[in-house]
């Protein structure tokens, strides 16, 4: 039997990361791994790459019973569950769309209406919390402006962050795209910029639409510089936050995204 | 963590929406809170990772009911022993997905229906239909961007390397089983996996294929 050299261990390290070793190999390699920095590094790097590979799947929401079972097993109380519901509401205050009617408006119009309702709820909630008259007046004026703008626009996408929470909308008003931001962190307008990307589902690289800034955490409408791509050529939007004030060749940190509303 | 700190932490969670990458409440902080017995932290982690954990499990086990069990196992394992995640050994998301992959593969190997499922997966892998077992329900652009980059990196691999890695990762096959399935010597399979993984890492690390964790 030939002596094992470290190239053999490299192959085993990748097999370990893939959970693809036979039981006897796995046991033997575990002993080696505990004492080998090189293999620990290789396993760690391989697991990192495989963590990305995990995203090459169709995304499906887990059924509600999964969370319920976890709550039950962890001994989370009903009060805890109630607090969690409030937490979810705080993170993503969503007003359901109206029931389907026989002559309902187009989907984009319903989304725009829903967006306006959400904005009103959000802004009203802020008023109660802050209990400041001047703030209420400012927000009321802002609300009027947002609703007015939404009234002349169509909603192209609802933006959510990586945790699936709504942080804004992409709306189209005339030939231009605008962002209704409500949850994106204000950026340093001297050093950073947000970039809106159109994402194509065909494997083509994302196409930069333009840049915009976020100046406040509350709801605000921000214009996107640049021209929107032709409809029907892309499937969604993504928002990245970039260092510098120019559009990079490739997106870096995706902070929000949303599928195009048909 | 003291009571006052706990109260502040929970209030922060309840009143301030964490935003991706803004660092309001990091994954690591949430894991620390889980170690402190805070259910709300586990729920927040579930909100961030429940979908990808369930989706990955479902992709591997090809059965929604079994995927539910795997997802439950993963989050319960985190709850019961959060110290298993070592912050010095990589990102939390990487660790959680690795745990998910291991649990899903273990579930596949336990199941009586493994032969039928494996035949189905093997057909898909060898025919190149690697993407969807069922139509996407809730794909989003954010995930699409990340997935496109991974697809690009996978597409850059020579076919034998891609086949070996995907059969092991998504199919749950051992190296020996991959060798038998593809009619390739075991040593060649190991070499292909090693070379493919190196190439994949390089492509993803160079920005051709990678995206970061959720937070």
Image (cartoon, coloured by chain):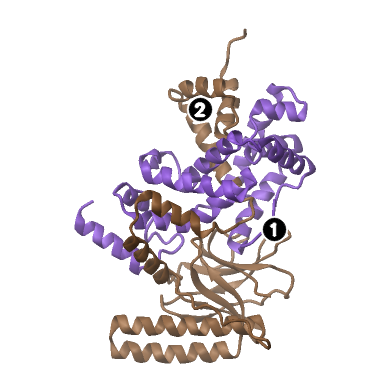
Chain colours: A brown, B purple
Q: Which residue is mark 2?
A: A39
Categorize mark 2 by other alpha carbons within 10 Å: few (<14), some (14-19), many (20+). many
Residue of label 1: B135
Label 2 resides on the chain identified as A
**Residue A35 percent coordinates (x, y):** 43, 22
Which quadrant of the rendered structure holds the C terminus of chain A?
Answer: bottom right
**A53 w.r.t. B19: above or below:** above
Answer left or right for B134 relative to B183: left
x%, y% of residue B45? Answer: 43, 54
Q: Is residue B147 left or right of residue A80?
A: right
Local SS, label 2: helix
Seen at 53% across and 81% down, the residue is A115
x and y percent of residue A221 in the render? Answer: 51, 82
| Distance between the alpha carbons at the discs numbered 2 and 1 | 38 Å
Which quadrant is the N terminus of chain A positioned in?
A: top right
**Above or below A244: residue B86:** above
Residue B81 in view of the camera:
yes
Residue situated in front as seen by the camera: B116 or B8: B116
Residue depicted at x 33% and y 49%: B32
Q: Residue furthest right?
A: B127
Most distant residue in the front direction: B112
Residue B87: percent from left, percent from top: 39, 42
Q: Are marks 2 and 1 in contact (CB under 8 Å)?
A: no
Residue at coordinates 37% horizontally, 69% vertically from top-left? Answer: A86
Q: Is residue B193 above or below residue B149?
A: above
């Amino acid at each position: 039997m030939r002596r094992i050299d470290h190239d053999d261990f490299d192959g085993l390290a990748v097999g370990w990361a893939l959970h693809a070793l036979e039981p006897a190999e796995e046991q033997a390699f575990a002993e080696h791994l505990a004492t080998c920095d090189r293999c620990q590094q290789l396993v760690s790097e391989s697991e990192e790459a495989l963590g990305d590979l995990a995203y090459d799947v169709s995304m499906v929401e887990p059924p509600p019973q999964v969370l319920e079972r976890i709550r039950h097993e962890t001994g989370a109380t009903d009060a805890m569950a109630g607090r969690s519901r409030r937490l979810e509401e705080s993170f993503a205050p969503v007003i359901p769309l109206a029931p389907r009617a026989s002559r309902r408006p187009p989907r984009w119009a319903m989304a725009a209406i829903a967006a306006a309702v959400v904005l009103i709820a959000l802004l009203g909630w802020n008023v109660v919390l802050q209990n400041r008259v001047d703030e209420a007046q400012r927000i009321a004026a802002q609300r009027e402006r947002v609703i007015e703008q939404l009234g002349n626009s169509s909603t192209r996408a609802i933006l959510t962050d990586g945790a699936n929470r709504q942080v804004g909308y992409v709306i189209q008003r005339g030939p231009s795209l605008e962002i209704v931001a409500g949850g994106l962190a204000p950026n340093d307008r001297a050093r950073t910029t947000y970039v809106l990307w159109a994402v194509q589902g065909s494997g083509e690289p994302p196409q930069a639409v333009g840049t915009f800034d976020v100046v406040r955490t509350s709801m605000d409408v921000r214009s996107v510089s640049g021209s929107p791509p032709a409809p029907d050529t892309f499937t969604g939007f993504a928002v990245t936050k970039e260092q510098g004030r120019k559009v990079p060749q490739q997106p870096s940190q995706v902070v929000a995204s949303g599928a195009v509303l048909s | 963590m003291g009571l006052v700190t706990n109260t502040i932490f929970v209030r922060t969670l309840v009143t301030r929406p964490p935003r991706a990458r803004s660092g309001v409440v990091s994954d690591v902080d949430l894991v620390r809170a889980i170690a402190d017995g805070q259910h709300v932290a586990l729920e927040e982690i579930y909100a961030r990772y429940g979908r990808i954990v369930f989706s990955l499990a479902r992709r591997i086990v090809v059965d929604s009911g079994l995927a539910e069990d795997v997802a439950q196992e993963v989050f319960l394992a985190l709850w019961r022993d959060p110290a298993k995640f070592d912050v010095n050994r990589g990102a939390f998301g990487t660790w959680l997905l690795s745990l998910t992959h291991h649990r899903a593969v273990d579930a596949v190997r336990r199941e009586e229906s493994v032969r039928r499922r494996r035949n189905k997966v093997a057909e898909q892998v060898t025919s190149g239909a690697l993407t969807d077992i069922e139509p996407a329900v809730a794909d989003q652009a954010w995930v699409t961007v990340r997935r496109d980059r991974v697809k690009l990196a996978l597409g850059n691999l020579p076919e034998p390397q891609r086949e070996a890695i995907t059969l092991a990762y998504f199919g749950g096959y051992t190296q020996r089983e991959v060798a038998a399935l593809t009619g390739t010597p075991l040593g060649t399979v190991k070499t292909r996996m090693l070379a493919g993984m190196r190439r994949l890492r390089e492509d993803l690390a160079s920005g051709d294929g990678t995206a970061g964790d959720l937070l």
